[in-house]
Image: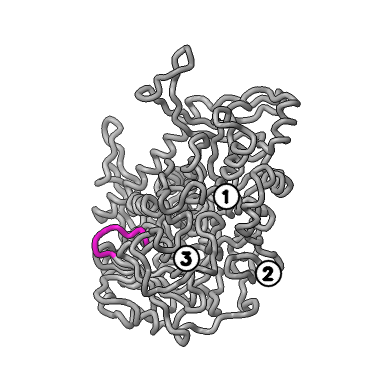
Amino acid sequence: MFRLKQLYTAIPLFAVIALFGSDNTQFLRRLASDCVHSVYATSETVKKIPAVPESGNGGLPAYISLCQQWLRNDAYYNETSKDDSYRVVEDDSVCSDWSAPHYNMLDIQAALIVTAQIKRIKYRHNCDRTRLYDEATMGFDHTTIQQVMNTPGIGTNKNIFSTEDVKQQCRRCLLQFDPQVESVRIKSKAVHHCLAWPADETRVLDATTLPFSPSKNNPVTAFSSIIHPFRQRIYHAAMEWQNVTDKPPGEETGGLVIQLDPTSIGLDFATVAAEIEQPVTSISILSGPTCATAVLPTGQICHEYGKGLRDYLAAEFSSLSTNGWNGGSGVTFKIVASSAASNSRMTLAKKLLCPPRTPSCYFPAVSKIKDAQTAKILEDPSWMMAVDFFTIAGTHGVVTVKVLDASQIPATYTAEPARRIQETGIADQFNYVNAMSDSEGYPDGVSPPVMASDQDIVAMTDQQILDDIAIALNRFLDNPNVYHQRLEMIPTMQMIQDAIANKEPLHINSVEEYYYPKNDDGNGPRSAEAKFRSGELTTDQDSGRSQPPPGVEYWETSSARRHESLLRIQADWETSFYGHIQDNRAGEDPSTIYEIFCPELIENGAISYLDGTATT
């Protein structure tokens, strides 16, 4: 049995290889490739994170595709001939976006809401297909919350928001959606969502009378009808991902998490300290990747503000100085590369505290399900979007929104920040976050879409709306996120002309669905013999024919990679539990130490998590 339990300082991996000599190079490379799994990064290393893919090749947020097909069905088909082979997956730009978890979850919610209203159109976000599993090359895991959310559909509460309400909102969103404008929107600053949570200046906002849960007696939007099952999914994702978060001891029973967004108000440190309700066993200040370059509205560079707040709270709460792992400080600041991990910690911590204008807190806050866990959302009286959110989502007995006095809100910039950071060779999101924009992320010089009035919506037929959006959404004719089964044949010119005339897409894409084998006469059975089909169609450019899904080998390889990742996650948890991996020592930046563990393979292919190789 071979064990390596020495601890190495956080020097580059190639330097470690050089120290060991060429004979051990292959061993160390395999060690790093198979076993690195950290969700934290520094303000410099996080800049290696891959750029968020653009919504190209005709791709659109799934809810827009679904709304368009819903109107097309009602406009061009009767009840018996409606297209029932329409399958949609989420766009890669939504799934892989690490910069805006709040807005991207609203995108997914919107698609779930629409597909719950119509039986003949299917949606699965399938965001797990976009995971890169590149922890070894990055040095950290940047898995998004979208990539770990459950994929099945969700039923909506039609007593709160009816099918007709959803369709009317679909019609409005189609009329105002502009793919060019949406492509330049800074999603990390976006708050409201056209379908799930549209802005409404007529809503009466009062933080002292927030409802427990949505009801027709209070203001509601489309996502009010889905909040109950959706918060369960966020909680489930938090539980599933907690094994790799390396959270402080006892965080679920006594710890406090403070979240920072690039839009957060940099409150005076004393104001933050005064809002911390005792007792707490640890204080963890978390932020996302954009905190590496973001300038807060109050002028501080985000990660510098986070470190300053950490130092101040460490002095104020000196009793926590040895409450971290291995006697380290119980007050920390970390840049979390994975929004799946930050969601987990915010959701599961005993207490959550969020400064004003921190929308990534909202869904984790409302998803606290365990007894006696609470969230306090501080609000800017000139902003009030947190009050708006919890007015339509409800507090569920765990959220308190406190509107601060205007005197407690530091002055904010009204012009471009003087300390704006611009760098080359990094993802655009790091620079976009500091561009001047309105409160919904529309950059200066870009006009936000004008919301269609109720009168406009009522006055237009489905056909007229489809005609109106045909030019703006012309690339939808080749949307890669939508699949039509009938186009698995060589298309004729007539088929193409008909599709264009009906504003239908010609596309290829991945599909995951349950299908039911039928008898020779085309009828049932449709229950016990259901099977699972999964595949990705590819195009044969020479013949013009779309090809069948990849063979068994492709899916076995994909499944094996996914299984290996799950084993690594389990290994991380097991080894942390048994103390094989030393946690960050006192006084060191928590993100400057690599932690590597390989479980030992024993007889018959079994894995021992108690013995193996470990380096830090």
Which structural element holds mark 3? Answer: helix
* Magenta span: 366-373
Front in this rendered view, residue 145 or 513: 513
- The CA distance from mark 2 to mark 3 is 21 Å
Nearer to the camera, 350 or 212: 212
Q: Distance between the residues labelled 2 and 1?
A: 27 Å
Q: Which residue is drawn at 30% across and 51% down?
A: 573
Mark 3 near mark 1, Cβ–Cβ under 8 Å?
no
Who's the residue at 40% across and 25% down the image?
530
Task: Determine the main secondary structure of the stretch shown in magenta.
Answer: loop
Residue that numbered label 1 is attached to: 170
Question: Looking at the image, is mark 3 or mark 1 earlier in the sequence?
Answer: 1
Q: Nearer the viewer, mark 2 or mark 1?
A: 1
The quarter of the picture where residue 294 lies is bottom right
What residue sits right under mark 3 in the picture?
Answer: 359
Q: What quarter of the picture does the C terminus occupy?
A: bottom left
In the rendered image, the residue lying farthest to the top is 520
**Three-letter code for the amino acid on which mark 2 is drawn:** Asp
Q: How far apart are marks 3 and 1 (CA)?
A: 24 Å
Q: Quadrant of residue 65?
A: top right
**Picture quarter with the N terminus:** top left
Q: Is mark 1 on a helix, strand or loop?
A: helix
Tell whether 385 sits left or right of 246: right
Q: Neighbour class for label 2 at 10 Å: few (<14), some, many (≥20)?
A: few
Q: Label 3 amino acid?
A: Pro
> Which element type, helix, strand or loop, lies under badge 2?
loop
Q: Which amino acid does label 1 sit on?
A: Cys
Vertical arrangement, residue 137 with respect to residue 392, above or below: above
Instruction: Name the disc covering residue 444, or none.
Output: 2
With respect to residue 526, does 221 lie above or below?
below
